[in-house]
Image: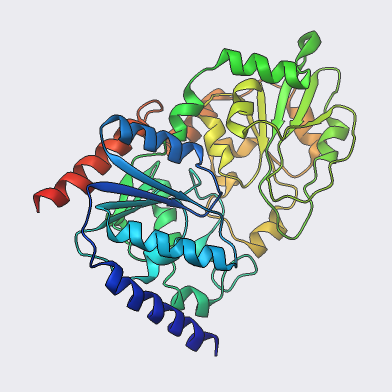
């Protein structure tokens, strides 16, 4: 029954789109995201760069929901897709994947994560964290991409499996956020330290950014128990969807008012786990530690593409908070961190936004105009 309903929905959307495509194509790019109702850092930086080159950009950001309002929003998406030369998305987009587009349209996926530490998309079909095979096939999950942007060849391989695409679709471009993370911002750092009253009396600031766990709470209390509160301030940035109760624990500060990338600039040490934030944090060159207390359960439920035990930073992976806290007192192997960064980020920070805009302009817009 589910198969029939999905087929009817796809058929109806394609019928409507057939008539929408009768409109003329304009000299424009459309950017679509369902991650949030506002532009992400990547989308804003890319839009500003394209607009600075005189390229018209439509931005459609609306968080996915089961509502009549979102159904009408998809019609807006369809109109913009049909009249654009290029479409950029940062997640699965229903109209992009299920519809039959003009042969001249070029579509690029710039995934909202800089890496794929954990499995996703096609890799998690029929798993607890993923979609069913019926929905994935019926809704043409991650189809119709001409290009998939990746920060490295290694991550490109992971994206091939997650999107179910061939290697020749991968373009090593990185993401605009890479440039932002690499840029120093002393004023922002001072602002954050003052706001949370951090770093007094020579204390170092530890930033803990865990991945989102759908079926369990995040264990920040164990870190707080063993980290020396006289020497460190522990700043915790939970995922926006994380429902873990924020307990009042001495030495723990929850950072909700600032973006994780700004917090990254203000900290001295980073702790994370299966989040792509580990790759992003490596850009700064600050000591990175991996607190993977639930790795067996997490891997069984979701699956991992990157096994830290096989990576250069594997020596800094800990299941036990007490052992991790003790390691903070030892010298850090920055060479191992550099090796890790170079493996997962091949595009030089500071150049990613420009290179992505170059690619879109030359390969997705001009090439279509000349054909």
Q: Quadrant of residue 51?
A: top left
Quadrant the C terminus occupies: bottom left
Does residue 348 appear in the picture of this structure? yes
Report the residue at 48% width, 43% height from top: 114
Quadrant the N terminus occupies: bottom right
In the orientation shown, which residue stands out farthest toward the top? 201
Report the residue at 42% width, 65% height from top: 75
**Residue 218 placed where, x, y %?**
77, 48
Report the residue at 68% width, 45% height from top: 239
**Residue 249 placed where, x, y %?**
90, 33
Q: Nearer the viewer, residue 39 or 297?
A: 39
In this image, 230 relative to 353: left or right?
right
Q: Nearer the viewer, residue 72 or 298?
A: 72
Q: How many marks?
A: 0
**Residue 148 placed where, x, y %?**
35, 52
Report the residue at 13% width, 49% height from top: 369
Q: Nearer the viewer, residue 37 or 259?
A: 37
In this image, 243 relative to 209: left or right?
right
In this image, 46 relative to 69: left or right?
left
């Amino acid at each position: 029954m589910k198969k029939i309903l999905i087929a009817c929905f796809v058929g109806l959307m394609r019928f409507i789109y057939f008539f929408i495509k009768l409109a003329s194509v304009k000299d424009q790019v459309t950017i679509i995201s369902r991650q949030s109702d506002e532009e992400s850092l990547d989308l804003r930086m890319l839009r500003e760069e394209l607009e600075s080159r005189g390229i018209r950009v439509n931005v459609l950001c609306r968080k996915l929901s089961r509502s009549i309002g979102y159904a009408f929003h998809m019609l807006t998406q369809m109109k913009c897709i049909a009249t654009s030369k290029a479409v950029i998305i940062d997640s699965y987009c229903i109209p992009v994947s299920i519809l039959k587009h003009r042969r001249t349209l070029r579509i690029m996926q710039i995934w909202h994560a800089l890496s794929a530490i954990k499995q996703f998309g096609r890799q998690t079909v029929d798993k607890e964290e993923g979609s069913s095979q019926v929905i994935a096939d019926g809704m043409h999950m991650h189809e119709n991409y001409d290009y998939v942007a990746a920060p490295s060849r290694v991550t490109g391989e992971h994206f091939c499996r997650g999107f179910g695409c061939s290697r020749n679709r991968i373009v090593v471009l990185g993401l605009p956020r890479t440039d932002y993370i690499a840029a120093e911002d002393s004023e922002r750092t001072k602002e954050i330290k003052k706001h949370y009253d951090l770093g007094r009396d020579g204390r170092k600031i530890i930033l803990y950014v865990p991945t989102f766990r759908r079926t369990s709470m995040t264990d920040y209390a164990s870190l707080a128990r063993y980290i020396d509160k006289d020497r460190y301030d522990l700043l915790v940035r939970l995922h926006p969807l994380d429902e873990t109760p924020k307990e009042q624990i001495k030495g723990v500060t929850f950072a909700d008012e600032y973006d994780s990338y700004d917090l990254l600039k203000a900290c001295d040490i980073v702790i994370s786990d299966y989040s792509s934030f580990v790759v992003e944090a490596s850009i700064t060159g600050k000591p990175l530690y991996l607190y993977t207390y639930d790795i067996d359960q997490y891997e069984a439920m979701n699956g991992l593409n990157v096994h830290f035990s096989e990576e250069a930073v594997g020596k800094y992976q800990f299941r036990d908070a007490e052992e991790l806290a003790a390691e903070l007192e030892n010298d850090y192997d920055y060479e191992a961190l550099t090796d890790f960064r170079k493996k997962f980020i091949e595009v030089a920070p500071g150049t990613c936004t420009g290179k992505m805009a170059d690619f879109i302009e030359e390969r997705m817009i001009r090439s279509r105009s000349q054909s």
